[in-house]
Every structure is written in structure tokens, then in C-alpha cells.
Image (tube, grey):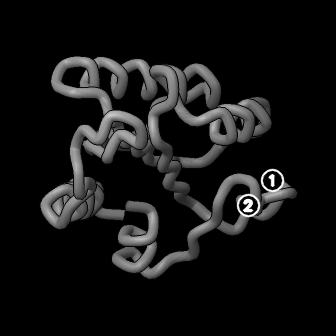
Amino acid sequence: IARYLSETLKTEIKKVDEITNNEFLANYSLLIFATPIHFLGPSLKMRNFLKSLKKTFQKKYLAICTYGGPGLIGKISSLICFKIFKKLIGSKPLAKISIPGQHHLFGFYQDRPNEEDLEMARKIIEKLDL
């Protein structure tokens, strides 16, 4: 999903562990954070990165979470994930995008995110008129 959005928006993509200096973020007016949901929240790498931003974060951002839990479990875990984003960063995202992603152990949502998921994410971002 991150690669697709990077190509669509014609912007750079970085993994959080590639960003060693938060000054790198100063070059951008909008950040898009995408993470799989691990144990009802962002991945550990993403959580640690977000914690490092909290005191100085003044940017607009989008939050994207992919979930592998079936049905209502996936939807609830997405809501919890977005609440954790807000708590760790200290502000609400401009948009929250929740997308099914294949569960690595149980195989739920095989071949997801798919083209429809990517298109849905693109449309949400387009509506923001960035």
C-alpha cells in the first residue's frame, strides 16, 4: 500500500527504521504512516518511531492500518490502532484508512490488499485535496 501511494502521489517512501534523524521530516508538509496491525496496534517499529516524534510533531498526517483479523475483529483492531496513533503523536490524522491484509499465520484475506483496496485508499486521499 505504501509503495502504491508513493507512486500515485509521486513522493518518496521510507521505512521508519531508515529514518535516523527526525529533521528529515522537516522537508515534508504531509506524512503518510502505514503499518500492519500487530496486537491491536501499530507494529513495534512504528510505535517506537511515533513515540520519538510526540514532543515535536507539528505535521499533518494520514494513518493507514492493514489488518489480518477476520470480520469485526479486524475493524475493531483498526479503531484501536488509530487511537494509538492519536495518543502517541498527540493529534488526529487528516484521514484514517483501514485495509485488509493477508494474515501471516492464519491466511485470512489472501491476496489483500488488492487493486480495489488500493483504489479506495487513493480516492480517500484525493478527496483531501492536498
**Is any part of residue 105 visible from this angle?**
yes
User: Which residue lies under the disc numbered 1?
Assistant: 22
Residue located farthest toward the left when viewing the structure as drawn: 116
Tell me residue 14's x, y (percent): 64, 65
Q: Nearer the viewer, residue 48 or 105?
A: 105
What residue lies at 29% left-to-right and 41% top-to-bottom? 107
Residue type of the residue flagged with mark 2: Ala
What residue lies at 49% left-to-right and 44% top-to-bottom? 35
In the image, is residue 46 above or below residue 5?
above
Q: Nearer the viewer, mark 2 or mark 1?
A: 1
Looking at the image, do the residues carrying marks 2 and 1 touch, with CB atoms under 8 Å apart? yes
Residue type of the residue flagged with mark 1: Asn
Q: Nearer the viewer, residue 2 or 130?
A: 2
Assess disc 1: are there few (<14), some (14-19) or many (≥20) residues with their C-alpha within 10 Å of its C-alpha.
few
Tell me residue 32's x, y (percent): 49, 54
User: Which residue lies under the disc numbered 2?
Assistant: 26
